[in-house]
Image (tube, rainbow, N blue to C red):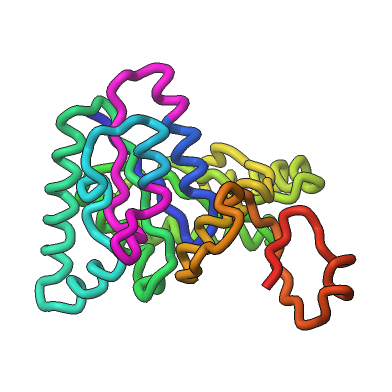
Amino acid sequence: MKSLYIASTEPRSGKSVVAIGLMKLIQQRIDKIGYIKPIGNADGGQPDADVELIRLLFKLEHDPKIINPVSIDDARNILAASGGEDELLTKVLHAYNQVAVDADVVVIEGTDYAGALSALELDINAELSKTLDAPVLMVASGENRTSKEIVSQVFAAKETIDEKGCDFIGVIVTRIAPSDHERISTDLETEFKKDGIDLLGVIPGEKLLSSPRMSEIARKVGAKVMFGHDNLSNLVSSVRVAAMTIGNALPRLEDGMLLI
């Protein structure tokens, strides 16, 4: 049984999209594919949104609590206690073994850098990779960054991975401006090669992929939906605070805009 740990160094890197794409590719060659997100963002009884999406897309049979055994809040509480790191790793390993027993390949998705542990998450991901004996594929966002800034960030992350004794197989860079894709790709390939890092892909940015649905926003802010229940799947591409009269606000509306 083989496994792959997909990690990132920051939130909103496109890590989950990369995981889905790789799982689709693997599924073309291998029937039994498993997935686990050891530490996720389960919130208020709601499962981690990425876990739920992947579970439904790939018709995974394991309970969400096995696929995502620890929430970020639980991880914080466990790590705050004496011997907490061993307890966390044991809990994750137990869930991983339940997924792995039925799979030929397991894709492991790292943390999201969205909680109180963000400063520690790269080290946590490295420890999880080591415990699960899974090589690391790094996903790095190139949004609003130069090629040198991207390479510097990835190199620093690779050093942490290497220090833990984990295998680092390469990097996929996401969210590159489409107009700069060819130039940045060439620069990145040259720069990464100097540092002995394999560049496995450069993905241009696509705004729709990072646009939340109205239902997600309503759930996150605890809003009561009064009208438009049939439109809760609409994507939100921009937000505007309308501190003005209706007459002044209407001409400024655009498709996909959330008006507050």
Q: Is residue 183 left or right of residue 211?
A: right
Decide which of 160, 243 is in the foreground and name it: 243
Residue 163 visible in rendering: no
| Magenta-span inclusion, residue 37 | yes
Outermost residue on the bottom side: it is 243
Number of marks: 0
Q: Position of residue 48 (x, y in %)?
A: 36, 54
Q: Is residue 135 left or right of residue 214?
A: left
- Say above or below: 234 vs 12: above
Decide which of 97, 250 is in the foreground and name it: 250
Determine which quarter of the picture holds residue 84: bottom left
Q: Is residue 197 left or right of residue 163?
A: right
Q: Position of residue 99 (x, y in %)?
A: 20, 37
Q: Which residues are magenta?
A: 24-51
| Magenta-span inclusion, residue 205 | no
- Say above or below: 244 vs 100: below
